[in-house]
Amino acid sequence: MDAVERGALEWSHVPIQFSLDGCRTVVTWSPVTLPKKMIQPAAKPDFCGAPGEPRCATLDFQGDRLPRYSDVAVDAGGRIKFRVRSKAFIGVESLRVTSPDAGKTWRIEPQAAAASNSGRFAPDSPSGPHTRTQNG
């Protein structure tokens, strides 16, 4: 668990979670919510069901495919920004994930190998190619 800013905490495993109010509420983002075309499925046991079913989706992100989060930034206005890498992602080195509204909506931007992010927010960045909504 890391303090990102006064009153803001972040912790992660497969999903990454944030508290913007000293642990009274929790915001969650998980790579299992990404479109299936972005994830190379891992082999799963038979009890998980047919390939592509949502059961056991976290198995796509275990072992050497575990998400690695970096460049985490949170501000008092509820803006969240981070980069996530996983060997499970298809065709990209990492994803830049941002939320302007404390996790009510998420913008996902695939990043090429040469991309670099700082921990600061760019003023009014343009929207990326994917916008996902996830209730935390």
Image: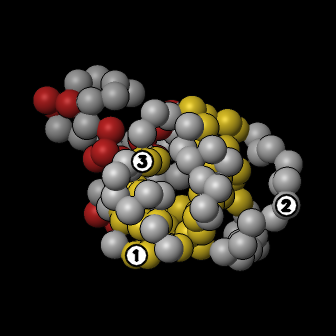
- In the picture of the structure, the residue carrying the numbered disc 1 is 2
Q: Quadrant of residue 75?
A: bottom right
Q: Residue at x 60, y 53 (%)?
A: 78
Q: What number is the disc on residue 28?
A: 3
- In the picture of the structure, the residue carrying the numbered disc 2 is 123
The earlier-in-sequence mark between 3 and 2 is 3
Amino acid tagged 1: Asp
- Label 1 sits on a secondary structure element that is strand
Up-down relation of residue 133 to residue 16 (above or below): above
Tell which of 133 and 26 is nearer to you.
Answer: 26
Q: Residue at x 56, y 47 (%)?
A: 102
| Distance between the alpha carbons at the discs numbered 2 and 1 | 25 Å
Tell which of 84 and 65 is nearer to you.
Answer: 84
Q: Are marks 2 and 1 in contact (CB under 8 Å)?
A: no
* Other residues around mark 3 within 10 Å, as few (<14) / some (14–19) / many (≥20): some
Which x, y percent locates residue 6?
50, 74
Which x, y percent locates residue 2?
40, 75
- Label 3 sits on a secondary structure element that is strand
Q: Are marks 1 and 3 in contact (CB under 8 Å)?
A: no
- Label 2 sits on a secondary structure element that is loop
| Distance between the alpha carbons at the discs numbered 3 and 2 | 24 Å
Amino acid tagged 3: Thr
Amino acid tagged 2: Pro
Which x, y percent locates residue 94?
61, 61
Q: Quadrant of residue 21?
A: bottom left
Which x, y percent locates residue 55?
27, 30
